Image (spheres, rainbow, N blue to C red):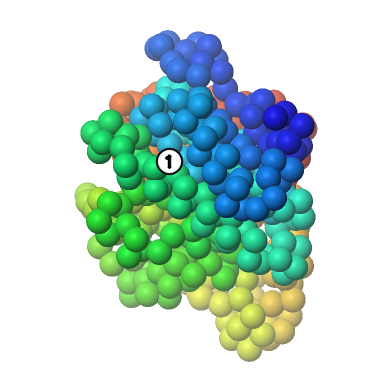
């Protein structure tokens, strides 16, 4: 019900491009992107809300689309429009997405006050959707992707265990600005190839995990993907991602040469001071211009989704034009956009 979606759910459901808007931009016939959302008032437990999400996807025909995105929102239930609008245009509307809310609190408060409900909610949603998706014929079911920003990325990582996917893997994941404690992000970053920077690492042969920023992917030219594609989109200036308590006594790797394009060459490490400075930067990181800090630009979302999905039906000129369109769309709505944090 409309009143059970919550404020963030109503925003997610009622905004986004229509089929007519997509067609007007592309000049091709488009489908209406499908969005499903289950707010906290809809049911008492994460398992019940996940089941509602599955039934809603069935009702609206989400499994009949070519792409299905499982979104884990931020602490308040917010879904960044740039992250979902971009794939809706990219697929000509042939996509369904679903999210379930787990908190009303901002992400920092949720992470420290109630860090487990988000994981439990993401886990319940994955079990419901993946369990049903596995029963569908492989040649007829949608490609299945996970997506999350910030705390959503952290909890989305917790939604599954890799051994569950060995027999029937999902198609990939786009995790954006993951907090520094995200387990898979942290493991891949620490195990990066020698000589690759911490802010855009190369992980082994780049067939499984790739890191992206404003300058594109970390993968070497011509690197082939494996059956599942995981992409981390992150900015070197994002304190949420690159904070670490160890800076109290050790210089962070991302201050080593060569630095990210958005990190000042004048910045220096000082024991204790740098850690405290970055801790203060975290709650302010959404107030930066798009493309810096924790404010992720629609153009970078688009580039990351192209990498994750492998879409090749857009020319470079069309992609450049779409990036401009998404930027204008974001600027037009930025005053009414309420960051969820």
Is residue 180 shown left or right of residue 186? right
Vertical comparison of 328 with 291: above or below: above
Point out residue 123 in the picture as x, y percentages from the top left corner.
51, 57
Vertical comparison of 206 with 125: above or below: below
Vertical comparison of 49 with 179: above or below: above
Q: Nearer the viewer, residue 183 or 254?
A: 183
For label 1, the SS is helix
Query: Residue at image x 39%, y 27%?
Result: 65
> How many numbered circles does the render carry?
1
The quadrant in which the N terminus is found is top right
Near mark 1 (Cα within 10 A), the count class, few <14, some 14-19 or many ≥20, is many
Query: Mark 1 highlights which residue?
Result: 305
**Does the image show residue 141?**
yes
Q: Nearer the viewer, residue 109 or 309?
A: 109
Query: Residue at image x 47%, y 47%?
Result: 128
Is residue 154 shown left or right of residue 94? right
Vertical comparison of 163 with 135: above or below: below
Quadrant of the rendered structure where residue 166 is?
bottom left
Q: Nearer the viewer, residue 247 or 207?
A: 207
Point out residue 115 in the picture as x, y percentages from the top left corner.
66, 66
**Does the image show residue 258?**
no
Is residue 207 shown left or right of residue 183? left
Quadrant of the rendered structure where residue 155 is?
bottom right
Query: Residue at image x 34%, y 49%?
Result: 170
Query: Residue at image x 57%, y 22%?
Result: 17
Q: Nearer the viewer, residue 22 or 5?
A: 5
């Amino acid at each position: 019900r409309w009143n059970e979606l919550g404020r963030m759910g109503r925003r997610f459901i009622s905004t986004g491009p229509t089929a007519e808007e997509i067609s007007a931009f592309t000049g091709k016939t488009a489908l209406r992107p499908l969005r499903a959302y289950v707010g906290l008032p809809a049911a008492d437990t994460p398992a019940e809300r996940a089941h509602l999400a599955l039934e809603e996807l069935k009702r609206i025909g989400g499994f009949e689309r070519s792409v299905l995105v499982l979104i884990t929102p931020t602490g308040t239930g917010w879904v960044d429009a740039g992250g979902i609008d971009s794939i809706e245009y990219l697929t000509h509307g042939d996509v369904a997405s679903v999210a379930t809310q787990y908190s009303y609190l901002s992400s920092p408060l949720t992470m420290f006050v109630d860090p487990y409900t988000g994981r439990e909610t993401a886990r319940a949603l994955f079990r419901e959707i993946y369990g049903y998706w596995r029963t569908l014929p492989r040649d007829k079911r949608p490609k299945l992707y996970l997506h999350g920003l910030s705390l959503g990325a952290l909890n989305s990582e917790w939604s599954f265990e890799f051994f569950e996917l060995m027999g029937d893997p999902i198609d990939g994941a786009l995790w954006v600005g993951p907090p520094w404690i995200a387990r898979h992000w942290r493991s891949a970053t620490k195990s990066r190839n020698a000589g690759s920077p911490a802010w855009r690492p190369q992980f082994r042969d780049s067939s499984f995990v790739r890191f992206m920023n404003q300058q594109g992917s970390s993968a070497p030219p011509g690197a082939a993907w494996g059956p599942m594609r995981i992409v981390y989109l992150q900015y070197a200036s994002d304190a949420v991602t690159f904070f670490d308590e160890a800076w109290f006594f050790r210089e962070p790797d991302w201050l080593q040469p060569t630095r990210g394009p958005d990190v000042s060459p004048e910045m220096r490490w000082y024991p204790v001071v740098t850690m405290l400075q970055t801790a203060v930067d975290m709650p302010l990181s959404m107030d930066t211009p798009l493309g810096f800090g924790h404010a992720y630009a629609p153009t970078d979302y688009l580039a990351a989704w192209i990498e994750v999905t492998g879409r090749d039906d857009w020319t470079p000129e069309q992609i450049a034009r779409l990036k401009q369109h998404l930027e204008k769309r974001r600027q037009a709505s930025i005053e009414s956009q309420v960051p969820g944090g």
